[in-house]
Structures are given as C-alpha cells and as structure tokens.
Amino acid sequence: MEVIILSSPEKVYKEVSQRIIAAINKKPDTVLGLATGQTMLGIYQEIIAAYNKEDVGFSSVVTFNLDEYLGIAPNDPRSFRYYMEENLFKHININIKNINIPSSIPENVEEECEKYEEKIKQKGGIDLQLLGIGRDGHIGFNEPSSSLLARTRVKTLTEETLRDNFGEGQCPRFAITVGTGTILEAKEIILVALGEHKARAIAQTVEGPVSASCPASALQLHPKVKVIIDESASKLLKRKDYYAWVWEHKKEVNDLKLITPIPGPEYRKE
Ligand code: GLP
C-alpha cells in the first residue's frame, strides 16, 4: 500500500482526479470502478473541469458503480443513479451504454447480481477502482463481518451507515454491492478518505490486521493500492513519518545516482 497524506481536501481532489485523467489518457477505453458519497464530489468536479478544458474525454470509457440501494426509483434523489447523473455523467461525454450501476428495482435480485459480475468480466475487469470508506471501514457496501472474498450480492446496511447517508429521514435498508472479492480483482485501486471521522477506519485499514471487522483492510492483500487522504484522516496512523518520507523521496528511484563509494575488495568476475 502506498499512503499519500496531503495537507487539504482540495489537494486530495487534485491528486486523485489527475491520476484518473492520466489513466484515461493512456487507455481511452479504461474500465473505471466508481464510488459515491461526499468524498467523491470534489474529485468529480475536478474531472468535469478537466473535461471542459478538453484535457480528457470519456467517449470510450466504461464505468461500473460499486453499489445501489434497493427499492428506490432510479431518479429518486436518494439513489446512486441520481447522484452519478447529477454529479458526473450529465456533465461529460460518456456513452449511456457504457454506464453500469446495479438496478435499484431488479425483477430478480440474484440474477441482477450475477449479471453485474458477468458484465465486469466481459469488459475485461476493472482497470482502476475508486473507493471511499465508511466510518466502520466498509468499502462499497461491504459492512463489517462481510466475507473478504464476497462477490456482488445484497447487503443489509448498518444503522450507522444509514444515519451517515440519510440522517433521520426515511431510507432503504438494503443495497446491492460488488463484493470485497470483486474489488480485489481490480488492476489498480485508489482509496480516498477525508476528515477526522475517518481516521479510525484508515488506521485499521492500513495498519490493522486483515480482518472482516474492517473490510477495507483486505486491500492490504492487493499489490497496487494507493490510499490518498488528508491530514485529519491520517491522525491515528503510527507510521505517518515513513509514509511522508516515501512520498518525498520515491521519485528519486528513477534517477539513481551512485552514492560516494567506500573502497572495498575486488570481486571475481565471470
Ligand atoms: C457510502 C458508499 C461508499 C462510500 C461511503 C462514504 O456508504 N456506499 O462507497 O465510500 O458512503 O461516504 P462519504 O464519502 O460520504 O463519507
């Protein structure tokens, strides 16, 4: 895992959006795994701004959202479909055929989940998966105690998640979510977190044991994960100084210089 701690949410939005834009410019038919929530809004705004400046285009990009509530109309402002349309899709040139979000009112829930998995495979898998994190360490809607190898299925949401996402209003109790196992198959993953209320989840994700009690900790098993967070979300990390050191010096590996040599013995040559 590479942990990148930046001094403000704005810097996080820039850093993450630039990585997404670079991935699309390198591979215009990138398959993106997308997330919802407050944390993503600033990232989507940066992406829209880049699109308006013609720095990136979405005509061949394919997207798969992580999750959707069940039993809610797709155009209900509480749905993730609505969130995605309003906050990203309607502002960019993405082809409607390339947008994938689990149905909120499927005829057959199990079939919907199987079809979703199948479609991800058909498109060659997720190239870059964007993730937020819940206060309890959930990714997608894989709440604590979810199997770390789970596939797309229905989850019953915790009261904490429902309160965080809806306040006291009427809300759906179930969601279809891709599983942690599905997420781990993405070629590359970026997890984003902002604010002190995420600090405990981030500490458990990065430095805690791999445990179903914190589903995001399964990311420790993935070889290409970047955790991009602000100062407040990093507060409970024990190895903050090391992560900062890596971030500061990592680029130097591309420009390796021989450090002042101390003369040693001559070794045999072949
Ligand atoms: C929801 C989503 C998650 C998201 C989380 C955090 O529960 N299913 O994918 O990561 O919210 O949201 P926020 O960024 O609003 O804290």
Image: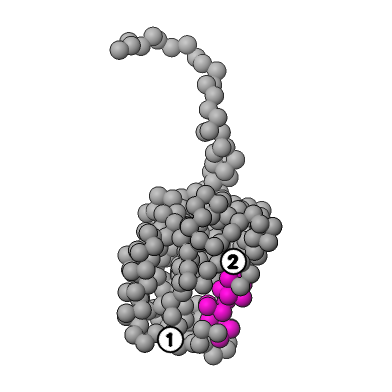
Quadrant in the rendering for residue 9: bottom right
Q: Is residue 127 left or right of residue 14?
A: left
Q: Main secondary structure of the magenta part?
A: helix
* Mark 1 lies on residue: 105
Q: Which residue appears at 41% of the width and 65% of the height?
A: 215
- Is 247 covered by the magenta stretch? no
Query: Percent from the top left, x then y, of residue 2?
Result: 50, 49
Query: Percent from the top left, x then y, of residue 109?
Result: 35, 83
* Picture mark count: 2
Q: Establish if 69 lies above or below 189.
A: below
Sequence-wise, which precedes: disc 1 or disc 2? 2
Quadrant in the rendering for residue 46: bottom right
Q: Which residue occupies the foreground of this view, 192 or 238?
A: 192
Q: Amino acid at mark 1?
A: Ile
Q: Which residues are magenta?
A: 76-89
Q: Which residue appears at 55% of the width and 67% of the height?
A: 94
Say which element carries label 1: loop
Quadrant in the rendering for residue 127: bottom left
Q: Which residue occupies the foreground of this view, 20 or 7?
A: 20
